[in-house]
Amino acid sequence: MKFKRFFGLVLVLFAVGISSACSQGRGDFIVPDYFDTSTPVEIEFWHTMGAASEEILERMIEDFNEIFPNITVNHASQGNYDSLFDMIARAIPARAEPTMAYVYPDHVATYLGRNPERSAVVPLNDLIYHSNPQIGLSAADRADFISVFWDEGAGYGVQRDGEDVIFSMPFSKSTEVMFYNRTFFNQHGLTVPRTWYEAREVARQIRHIIDTDPTVPSNSLPFAYDSSSNLFITAAAQQGNAFTSATPEHFLFDNPGNRAMVEFFADMYREGIFVTREMPELQGTFSSSLFTVGQAFMTIGSTGGTRHNIPARVGDGFLFDAGVAPLPQFDLENRAAIQQGPSIAFFKRDNSQEVLAAWLFYKFITNPRNSAIFAMSSGYEPVRYSSYDLDIYQAFLEDDTLFTRVARITQVQKDDFFFSPAFRGSAQARQQVGFIMNQRMLNTRTPDQAFSEALRNLRF
């Protein structure tokens, strides 16, 4: 059975006090019948973009203003995803949140609180299905959004009139892939692994080379994975093991399959062939920091960080040739690859024209062409099917860069994306299973202790 669940990741900051504050009551959001182009309106967009992506965004804003000169888009990068979440969570009680912002499902689940319809987050159904074609999305446009990305925004377990309420829309979508040192692989006759069992054997071969070849730095790493939490959740999905559920009992990850899976990776770590970012060997840095200088030979990280995996330059060239491969699987007939990357949510305003302006801006930056442009220069995925067919995207794929190598892999791998439900506590579940993986690798807890402690930490 192939998983088609999607999961919202990356949230480690959460407190009951914040959750309660985010549940402050708000009135219903009524969508205007039209957008008033005669009155100036400003919107605030908070995100986590770096300088390169902000430059693309600025160009899109300029193009957008040719259509809507009365809309001023103010945008600001707010650090990493955790700090962005924390800023919004603190801003909501003071009604100082932005008009629109990057979000992960776990973020939105927190902002929705216990009464989603009265929260600060705008339910988007009335905008999406609005009869005014300038506002609403046509049936063709709705179908053009990649389905697994679209479904994430309706995965909050809230219904109205029998329909799922959509609280977020896709924007910068990514997955994980395996980067490998193709030069090193060719030199030593290594085969790019497709399964975790093959990856273990290749990592053993690399370990032997590191230990016996004096030209290879002795502190090099055969195989590194950036996120212990992603590793647990993805490997569980690949094996068909339960992780969480949208309905109580939410936390289902303590099962024999997951216990055995954790030991598989813990044994690899103890054998000296595999590490995660949280292990002492990486000291909290991303594996790309060693990969780019030729001291890690297989790494798994986000496609959104593609530019950080470009090998170091030597003169007019690169230190080595970097290859890209799909995520290793436990079962090639039951493939699963984590989907990540932020969506966008909108926040209620007394002046509904502000929200409408933000929605029109979102529609513009996710039209097929703009979605393709953002993806080509960032390593993220287009969110529209038709983006892949555009001449500019097809021409992009004809080039041979690390970005295009990633894009060719993710075009295929997107069929394997999955998500888990977002609910109050889903962020903590993600954090706790990462702790389980870390504790077992370091052998600081027995399996019983690690899983039991994780479950105790998830009692609300």
Image: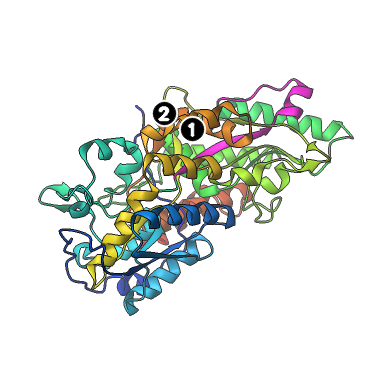
Q: Is residue 418 visible?
A: yes
- The residue identified by callout 2 is 389
Secondary structure beneath label 2: helix
How packed mark 2 is, by other alpha carbons closer than 10 Å (few <14, some 14-19, many 20 or more), is: some
| 328 sits left or right of 31 in the view | right
Q: Is residue 156 above or below residue 84?
A: above
- The part of the image, by quadrant, that contains residue 178 is top right
What sort of colour scheme is used for the picture? Answer: rainbow
* Residue 304 screen position, x and y as percent: 54, 46
Disc 1 packing (10 Å; few <14; some 14–19; many ≥20): many
Q: Secondary structure at mark 1?
A: helix
Range covered by the magenta-colored residues: 173-194
Seen from this angle, which residue lies furthest left?
Answer: 161
Q: Which mark is residue 393?
A: 1
| Residue 355 counted in the magenta span | no
Q: Which mark is residue 298?
A: none
Instruction: Name the residue type under label 2.
Output: Asp
Image coords of residue 89 (percent x, y): 38, 70
Residue at figure coordinates x 44%, y 69% from the top left: 86
- The residue nearer to you, when weighing 459 against 391, is 391
The quadrant the N terminus occupies is top left
Residue 62's spot in the image, x, y percent? 45, 56
Tell me: residue 439, above or below residue 30: above
